[in-house]
Every structure is written in C-alpha cells, then in structure tokens.
Image: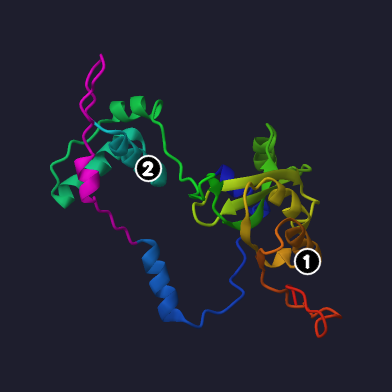
C-alpha cells in the first residue's frame, strides 16, 4: 500500500528505442549470461588441504586457496556463509571430489586474516623496471547520500542532490586500478587524463577510452608524457580532420 501512494512520482523505465536485428546472436548472448561452468584443476585439488604446520598451534584443515575460493563464491553470488557452505558442498558432490567443505564458522574466522594475493604487473630488465602498461580510462558518477533520502522517497519532496565524479585509470592486463581522481561533476573527462597519467609509474603503451575522450587536449597530454603511446579513442559522429590533416596529420587525424 505505501508504494502505491508514490506510484505517480516514481521513475519509469523508458522503452527500448532501438530495434534488435540480430535476434539469434542476441538470444544466444542472453542465454550465455546464465551459463555457469565450475571446475577444479589438479593443482587446486592437491593444494586444497593446508600444509603441515611447523610452529606451535592448532593444525589448519584448509589452505588459503580453499578459503579464497569459498569467499569468492560468497562475494560473487552474494550468499551468506551458511549458503556458501552449502553451495561448495553441492559443487564438490557434483564433481565427485573427495574434498572437505569448510563450514561457515571457519569461513567467517579465516576471512578476517586471509591474505589475498593481488595480480602484479611483470617487470622487465635487470633493474626491475615496470613492464609497459595498456591504460584504460573512464569515469563514473557518485551520489552523496544523506539522512534525508528516506524522507524524499516517502514524501516525494525534491532536494538538491550532490554528485562527484570518479576518474579511473585501469591496467588492461591485470584489471588493477593504477590511478584515481575525485572531482566535481562539472569537470570534463578529457581534462583529467593528464593527472591520471602522472600517477602511473612506468611506460605507457596505449591509452584507451570512449568517445568522450576524443579531444585535442587528450592527445596532447598523452604525447607530452608518453610520446610513443597510442591513443585508442573512437571518433565522435561530428568529428572532422584537422586543417593540417593533408600536410602534417596528427594521431587524431
């Protein structure tokens, strides 16, 4: 009943504006979203049990790999620890593996002290210099919520909401965030490419972004810091070659 009172003020989902022409491929993609494949490699099966402890204390039953696998399923499927225990037990039974299943109390206790290894970029050369980086740049909006959000939903009042824009630079090989900036919503995406590049340690091979980064300032910022880097940005629909495209073409041309 309370939801029907605000029915007239709720946001509507707009209708689809474009028509789907490749229905077989579109339907295959939708089915693929629900596909699930789980397997255990031989190395993971051998490393499932914890190694014998050489120091004082109780012997652990499960290795960090087993706990990290369970916590990964816990985070991906947004399950409680008890449901995670049941899911892993079902997978182990379906695969016919003779593996112990960590209980929910063990997952809760070990999650507080588990050291998760993060992927690192490989180094080249004897000096340990960082390998060349393929940088992906993008931005997203962050809404600043306060205690009045519930009143806005209940009474339908309008307040001035504050937004911030988070600019990110991501390593294309490892998916690790190597640069980040927080600005106001008025700041343009292309203007923050230079500050993002200043946070990256090591050479950059390419900078990839969407059509919002198709600006002369972006190409200039990349060329100033990494002259040999390629800028992979799709041109806008209204993009035209520069005046010197025939005599001295730039990378954007």
Q: Position of residue 141 (x, y in %)?
A: 68, 49
Report the residue that reaches farthest toward the front.
126
Color encoding of the figure: rainbow
For the magenta stretch, what is the residue range? 35-61
- Quadrant that contains the N terminus: top right
**Is 243 placed left or right of 117 in the picture?**
right
**Is 149 placed left or right of 27 in the picture?**
right
Residue 41 covered by magenta stretch: yes
Report the residue that reaches farthest toward the right.
243
**Is 229 placed left or right of 133 in the picture?**
right
Residue under the image location 62 percent in, 65 percent down? 14
Can residue 48 be seen here? The reply is yes
Q: Which one is nearer the viewer's eye here, 93 or 147?
A: 93
Count of number-bearing discs: 2
Q: Position of residue 66 (x, y in %)?
A: 28, 38
Q: Which one is nearer the viewer's eye here, 137 or 25?
A: 137
Residue under the image location 63 percent in, 54 percent down? 203
Above or below, 163 relative to 245: above
Q: Report the predominant secondary structure element of the magenta stretch.
A: loop
Sequence order check, earlier mark of 1 and 2: 2
Can residue 90 be seen here? The reply is no
Q: Position of residue 117 (x, y in %)?
A: 42, 39
Q: CA distance from mark 1 to mark 2?
A: 40 Å
For label 2, the residue is 72
């Amino acid at each position: 009943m309370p939801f029907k009172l605000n029915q007239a003020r709720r946001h509507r989902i707009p209708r689809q504006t474009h028509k789907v022409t490749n229905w077989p491929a579109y339907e295959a993609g939708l089915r693929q979203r629900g596909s699930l494949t789980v397997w255990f490699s031989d190395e993971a099966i051998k490393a499932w049990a914890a190694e014998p402890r050489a120091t004082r204390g109780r012997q652990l039953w499960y290795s960090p790999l087993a706990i990290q696998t369970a916590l990964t399923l816990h985070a991906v499927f947004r399950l409680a620890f008890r449901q995670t225990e049941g899911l892993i037990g079902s997978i182990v039974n379906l695969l016919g593996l003779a593996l112990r299943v960590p209980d929910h109390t063990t997952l809760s206790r070990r999650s507080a002290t588990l050291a998760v290894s993060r992927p690192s970029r490989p180094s080249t050369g004897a000096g340990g210099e960082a390998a060349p980086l393929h940088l992906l740049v993008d931005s997203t909006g962050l809404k600043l919520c306060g205690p009045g959000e519930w009143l806005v939903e209940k009474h339908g009042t309008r307040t001035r909401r504050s937004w911030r824009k988070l600019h990110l630079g991501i390593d294309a090989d490892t998916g690790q965030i190597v640069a980040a900036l927080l600005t106001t919503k008025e700041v343009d995406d292309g203007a923050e490419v230079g500050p993002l590049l200043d946070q990256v340690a090591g050479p950059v091979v390419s900078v990839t972004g969407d059509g919002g980064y198709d600006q002369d300032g972006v190409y200039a910022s990349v060329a100033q810091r990494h002259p040999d880097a390629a800028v992979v940005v799709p041109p806008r629909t209204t993009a035209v070659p520069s005046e010197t495209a025939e005599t001295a073409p730039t990378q954007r041309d």
